[in-house]
Every structure is written in structure tokens, then in C-alpha cells.
Image (cartoon, rainbow, N blue to C red):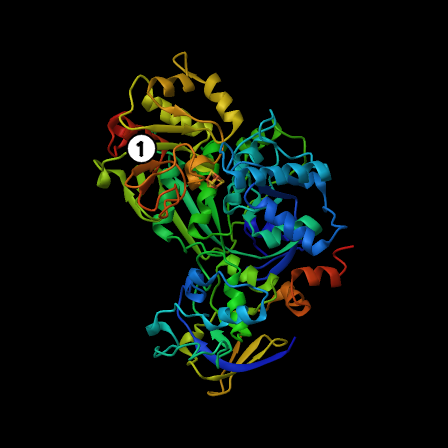
Amino acid sequence: MEKIVKGNAFVLGNNVDTDQIIPAEHLVYSLSDPEEKKKYGHFALSSVPISQSGLPNGGIPFITGENYTSEFNILIGGANFGCGSSREHAPFALQVAGVKAIIAESYARIFYRNCVDGGFLLPYETPIKLSEKIKTGDELELNVEMNSLKNITTGEIFSLRSLGDILPIIEAGDIFKYARQSGMLA
Amino acid sequence: MAMTITEKILAKAAGKKNVEPGVNVWLDVDVLMTHDVCGPPTIDIWKREFGGQAKIWDKDKLVIFPDHYIFTKNPQANRNVEILREFANEFGIQNYYDVGTDRYKGVCHIALAEEGFDLPGTVLFGTDSHTCTSGAFGMFSTGVGNTDAAFILGTGKIWEKIPESLKFTFDGELPPYLTAKDLILKVLGEITTDGGTYRALEFDGDAVFSLSMDERMTLTNMAIEAGAMNGIIAADAVTETYVKQRTKKPYEIFHSDQDANYIAKYRFDASKMEPSVAKPHSPDNYDIVRNVKGTKLTKSYIGSCTGGKLSDFVAAAKILFGNKTAVPTFIVPASTLIAQQLEEETISGVSLKQIFENAGCVVAQSSCAACLGGPMDTIGRAVDGETIISTTNRNFPGRMGSKKSAVYLASPLTVAASALTGVITDPRDFL
Ligand code: SF4
């Protein structure tokens, strides 16, 4: 896993629920067929109200045209990110769309667990309201070793909460791979 | 370092001296619970990931209760129970409580308590969001998805993020027209369905410690309705008496330190509170009964892990005694033990069951039944156009079976009083 994640910010508000992340009508596509699973990327964040999509101004679609990956790959969220139904497709859709990390003030518990245990994304927490400090499109650099985030566009550096004991799971790939590697499973 | 009760239990299970909110730790799990809805997919993932050599980390710590879709002709539902039965046979699972045998228990969260699996200071995970119920015993308990459950099944371990804690203190004496359901509906009205997200809800105060274990479980059961990770009440003499009657297993009692950290503290005077409802279609849509009284009903329902315990039926029977219900009323004891107690417990020499039958209620077999709708042939299931008053824990659209029905959540006293009049009624009118 990369220790430095570089990318462009996509800023969202509070209470982004899993229906906004991947609407229920799209849960029908195969998760393993490489062509079909691209659709999850194409529809990622497609139900975020347009006024809330790409803050502070909104009106920025996460995915454009026929694409299935986004030009934005670090999400900045507010409180209670990933609330609503506990579908595991939500972090998967974001991963397919090219998202590498989320930095939010807080997460709904099942979404957070799914990000880690399925090996989809880095879910970082921050005590700071980053949505007021970072604009959609800002260039960011996430340092996983230092637990810090640099806004290259403005030069500001923010410290993030450590991932603690779950970092090795993310590094291994998913929770089962981690267990096999670490000898937790005989 | 000062810690809350939740932090202390998790620190112990993580083998650490201290833990802090926000930090992820690995826990040793004391009990894993699953049921007929999530058990089969959990077993599938476990087999897929751990292969033909898949081993259960500790057979004695796995507890399986078929309880959700039980008395139905639905083939998928019955196949799920069949999968559990085969699994229990193949792997020699002692703590499997099969349908159609005298081991059958009913709703998992209540059966866990009755069978002595709820032990102060321990850590329990279950494939059901209301696993938080067991927190009434001063233990840590929470729900997980099938992937996490499969992982626990193979390893006995799971990681968890230490939650921040919120504290709810209920002072004073609970008046006879209120129950624990009125208290928790009030809490949900205050903090809403995301006010507890990734947090621990700790209940405290004289009014809480005056409650029976049944009533305490009503409080912790609905912690998840606020999005919380767990609900918890420190164990006391009431807890110990309950536990010792059921098991000889060891346990350890923890208390929050005086100066432990809470992100918020709420205080209520229980003696001044009002009978409460959650209006359609969300458990945090709080109101007092007086503001909605007179609302016309088509059905009333007393059952589930939060509202189908002995204490709930004793409360309802007090009001129903010697009266006739005005709308169809369903009595669904959460467990087979409670069903038996309905026949044994009496008021003025009449058994609770007889009181209900005399009032014209339908007394059903123990299971989750219409709490979550269930297959079409589920007893008490909501149909289009209904307005129901219920002691259950969720009133989201469609939860009890029909998206075109409306459900009010209330205490067993309020539900019983309303059953007699056919409109939402303040229980004080009958007490
Ligand atoms: S009774 Fe209702 S809330 Fe309780 S476990 Fe069954 S379905 Fe869930």
C-alpha cells in the first residue's frame, strides 16, 4: 500500500448515506465481472444532491460523461459519513471510481467496518471541519505514516487520527488476508 | 486514566491497561451469536475464506437461535433453519436451539439472557443490530455484518473502534404509568437516530437501577435506534441475582470512573416524564401520548425483544384485566420461557394468558413474528392502510410488513390502554 496518497479533493457535507453513495437500484450488477463492475464506479455518488456535490459551491458531478472513474480521488466528508443501509457495495463503488481515501469527521459504524474489512478504502477521521478548509479540486497529499494531510494548493497541514490497529488490515488487503498473514489462522 | 464502563470492558478484552475513544483495538470475543437470517450467509463466508479445513475457534462460545422466520410455510425461510440444523449437527454445536424441539427458545436477545450467556464485563458480538440489548448486563455487546461474524467464527477475534460515550441519567422514581419504553423514546427524541452514531450510550440514575432486568433490556435494546454501537448499564445486585440463577460462569463488574469522559451528559427527572410515543415513520419522531390521543387504530401489537418480555405482559395485563379489546390485539411472547410464564403468573388468581384471551387477544407462539414483517403468513403482519400501535422498536415504512401502514411505538401500558378503546389512549385513563 502506498504510504503517500496524492490526489484531488472532492468535498461533501454531513450525513452522506449509502443510498447517495450507490443508489439501491444499481445493486444488481455483478461484483466480480470486470466489465459489469465498472457500473458501480459510474454510479458512485450519483444520488448526492447536486447542490451538495463538490463543496463549497456544489454543482460538480463526481463522475462525468460515460466515465467510471473520477478525477477526484480523496473524499472530504463531514459527520456520520456512510449512514443508512449497511450495504457493502458502497465502499466498493467508491473504490471502483478510483477513490483511495476518505477523511471525515465521523462515520456510521458498519460503513467504516466495511471500508476496512473488505480492503476498499482508507477511512481517516479528523477532529477538524476540513470541509471548511478544503475546496473541491484542491490538490492533497495524505501521509499514512505521519497521519497527516497536506493541502498542497494552500500549503496547510492537518493532523489526522491514527488508524491504530487496523492499518495492518488495510496493508494486507482485507481482514481475511490479514488473518492468514499474521498467523491468526492456523 | 479515568475510563467509562465501556472503555474498561474493551480495554480488558484488548489486553490493554487503557483505551481511548477513536482508537482501534483487537478484542477477544466471549460469545458470538447468530440466527436464521444471518447465520447461513455467515457460514458461507466462513467456509469460502477458511476452506475445507475451516475450524470454529471455540464451539462453546458460538450460540445459534433460529428466531426470525419460524412459523411459516415460506420455503426459503425453512431452508435457512435447515442449514443451521445441518451445520450444528456437522460441527457438534451444543448451543443450538432447534425449532420443533423443547430446546426452542425464541428471540435471540432475550434467550441469550435467559440461558446465562449475558455476563457482566464480557464481550458479545451478534449478527443482529439489536445485539446491543445485552448491554443491560454491564457487558459490551454489539451487532456486526456477516463478514465480520465469519471472521470471528474462525478466529475468535475482531477489531473495534473504541466509542465515545454519552451518559443518560434518570433521577427520581418512575411513576406507575411509565415504563422503560417511555424513557428510551424520550432519549431518541432528544438525540435523534444519528445522535449515538459510533458511540456508547450509558444509562444511569436511581430510576434506571430501580428497574428489573427485563426493563433494563428495553433501554439498551433501542440504543441502535440512535445509531449507537452499544448501550450499557452497570451491573448491580439485581443483575447478579439474575445471572447467578442461570449460570455458574465467572463474570466481572465494572463501573465508570467519576471523572470519566463523556461527550455529552443528559439528565431527566423520571417522576416528571409523560407516557411517550414515536410517531410514524421513525423511532425518534417523539411525542407525548396526550398530543396524539384519539388517533384511530386498526391493530395493537405487544411483542419482540424490546416489548415482549414478562414485564411488558404484566404491565399490559393490569390494564386489560376484565376488559375487552376494541381492535385486533396480538400478544407475542419473545421466548418460550415467557410463554410459559404467561400461564404461571397470575393477577387475582387469573393467569396472564387467560386475561389476554378473555380480553379477545390472539396469543401467538414465540418468535420475532411481525416485528420485522416477515413472510406473508406471519401472524400480526401489517397490511395496507393499517394504523398500528406496537411495543416493538422500529416503525420505518414497511418494517411491520406494509409500506402503506403507519406504526406508533409505545409502552405496553399505552398499547394496552389503546387496544381497549381503539384509539391512542393515555394509560392513566385506566390506572
Ligand atoms: S424481535 Fe424484532 S427487533 Fe428483536 S431480534 Fe426479532 S426482528 Fe429484531
Callout 1, which amino acid?
Lys
Q: Is residue B100 left or right of residue B198?
A: right
> Where A49 sits versus B265, above or below?
below
Of residues B403 and B216, the one drawn nearer to the viewer in this rendering: B403
Look at the numbered disc 1 and give the secondary structure of its residue.
Answer: strand
- Give the residue furthest to the top: B349
Q: Is residue A57 left or right of residue B224?
A: left
Q: Residue at x 42, y 51 (%)?
A: B226
Q: Is residue B354 visible?
A: yes
Q: Position of residue B154 (x, y in %)?
A: 70, 50
> Where B373 sits versus B244, above or below?
below
Q: Residue at x 50, y 72 (%)?
A: A41
Q: Is residue B274 visible?
A: no
Q: Position of residue A106 (x, y in %)?
A: 48, 64
Residue receiving disc 1 = B299
> Where B43 sits versus B18, above or below?
above
- Dot 1: within a 10 Å radius of its alpha carbon, few (fewer than 14), some, or many (20 or more) residues? many
- Give the residue furthest to the left: B294
Of residues A176 and B205, the one drawn nearer to the viewer in this rendering: A176
Name the image quarter holding residue B169.
Answer: top left
Q: Position of residue B352 (x, y in %)?
A: 41, 19
Q: Is mark 1 within 8 Å of ligand 1?
A: no
Name the image quarter holding residue A30.
Answer: bottom right
